[in-house]
Amino acid sequence: MDKKSLTAVARQQLKLAGTATSGRSSQTLFGGHANALRQTVVALTAGQSLAEHDNAGEATLQVLSGTLILISGTTEWKGSAGDLLVIPRARHSVKAVDDVAFLLTVAKS
């Protein structure tokens, strides 16, 4: 059994994102590329984004702190701390409205 504080990991990743030239940082907490399930805390500083990309299977995004926008085509969903967004099985991107940390959960098909 392994236990992690999402609050502490989010805080740490936001601190790292704040000093990174890309304005982002992430840490995989469970799984990895060899596993079907992967959970990663991602942090983006205000205005930064993850460029449009496909997803590798079913995926959700749980906002831990801050605010973001999930974009797929012409549809946008705003997410704030405590929100759980189901990521569409289509190309999508994520933009940070302000400094944001979220838990990305992906179950590969």
Image: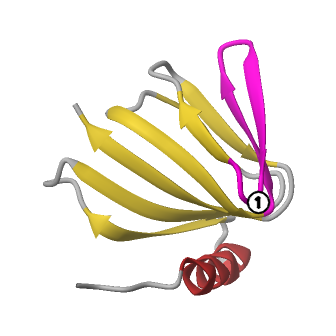
Q: Position of residue 1 (x, y in %)?
A: 23, 84
Q: Is residue 97 left or right of residue 56?
A: right
Name of the residue lying farthest toward the top: 74
Q: In this view, does 91 lie to the left or right of 44?
A: left
Q: Residue at x 36, y 45 (%)?
A: 106
Q: Residue at x 67, y 68 (%)?
A: 21
Check disc 1: other Cα within 10 Å, few if <14, some if 14-19, many if 20+: some
Q: In the picture, residue 99 is in which quadrant?
A: bottom right
Give the image's coloring scheme: secondary structure
Say if the magenta span includes residue 102: no
Q: In this view, does 30 lie to the left or right of 71?
A: left
Q: Nearer the viewer, residue 52 or 56?
A: 56
Q: Name the residue under label 1.
A: 81
Chief secondary structure of the magenta portion: strand
Q: Position of residue 17 (x, y in %)?
A: 66, 73
What SS does tag 1 mark?
Answer: loop
Specify the amino acid type for callout 1. Answer: Ala
Q: Where is residue 77 in the image (x, y as percent from the top left)?
A: 75, 31
Q: Give the range drawn in magenta.
A: 66-83
Q: Position of residue 5 (x, y in %)?
A: 52, 85
Q: Quadrant of the C terminus?
A: top left
Q: Residue at x 53, y 32 (%)?
A: 87
Q: Residue at x 82, y 51 (%)?
A: 47
Answer above or below: position of 4 versus 14.
below
